[in-house]
Image (cartoon, helix red, strand yellow):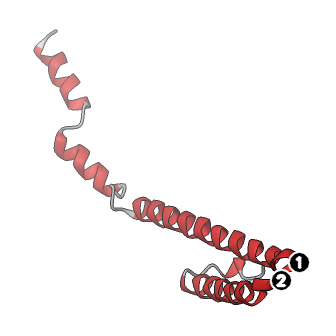
């Protein structure tokens, strides 16, 4: 390899500073894409927790219909009201308003 070929090859590859500036220009780890990924992850976790609360609510509703649980009807009713209140607060706090119609 001649001296001239060596210079051409090395100039085609970015040095460390060029790579770093390109990384920062594209947003790097803390750029817009990073924030959106974190927001999407958090939203996914919020939706999963909301789904868990909805399952609890549905279970309590079914238990209210069960005649075998008539003796604890008041307790189940109170738990159901509490879970529904938590869901409403959760929807408001995490701005999950599209789920409030369920």
Looking at the image, the residue that sits furthest to the top is: 1
The quarter of the displayed image where residue 52 is located: bottom right
- Of residues 36 and 94, which is closer to you in this image? 94
Q: Residues within 10 Å of mark 2 (few under 14, many from 20)?
A: few
Q: Is 15 left, or right, of 99 in this rendering?
A: left
- Of residues 70 and 17, which is closer to you in this image? 70
Q: Which residue is mark 1?
A: 67
Q: For the residue labelled by badge 1, is the local secondary structure a helix, a strand or a loop?
A: helix
The quarter of the displayed image where residue 61 is located: bottom right
Q: Tell me the quadrant of the picture where the N terminus can be found.
A: top left
User: Which residue appears at 77% of the width and 73% of the height?
Assistant: 58
Labelled disc at residue 70: 2
User: Which residue appears at 72% of the width and 82% of the height?
Assistant: 100
Q: Position of residue 91 (x, y in %)?
A: 62, 82
- Of residues 29 and 22, which is closer to you in this image? 29
The image shows residue 18, relative to residue 83, as above or below, that is above
Q: For the residue labelled by badge 2, is the local secondary structure a helix, a strand or a loop?
A: helix
Q: Tell me the quadrant of the picture where the C terminus can be found.
A: bottom right
Q: Residues within 10 Å of mark 1 (few under 14, many from 20)?
A: few
Looking at the image, the residue that sits furthest to the left is: 3
Labelled disc at residue 75: none
């Amino acid at each position: 390899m001649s001296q001239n070929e060596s210079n051409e090859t090395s100039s085609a590859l970015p040095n460390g500073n060029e790579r770093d500036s390109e990384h920062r220009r594209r947003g790097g780890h803390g750029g817009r894409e990073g924030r959106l990924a974190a927001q999407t992850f958090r939203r996914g976790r919020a939706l999963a927790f909301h789904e868990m609360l909805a399952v609890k609510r549905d279970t309590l509703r079914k238990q209210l219909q069960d005649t075998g649980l008539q003796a604890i009807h008041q307790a189940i009713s109170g738990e159901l009201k509490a879970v529904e209140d938590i869901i409403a607060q959760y929807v408001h706090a995490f701005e999950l308003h599209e789920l409030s119609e369920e």
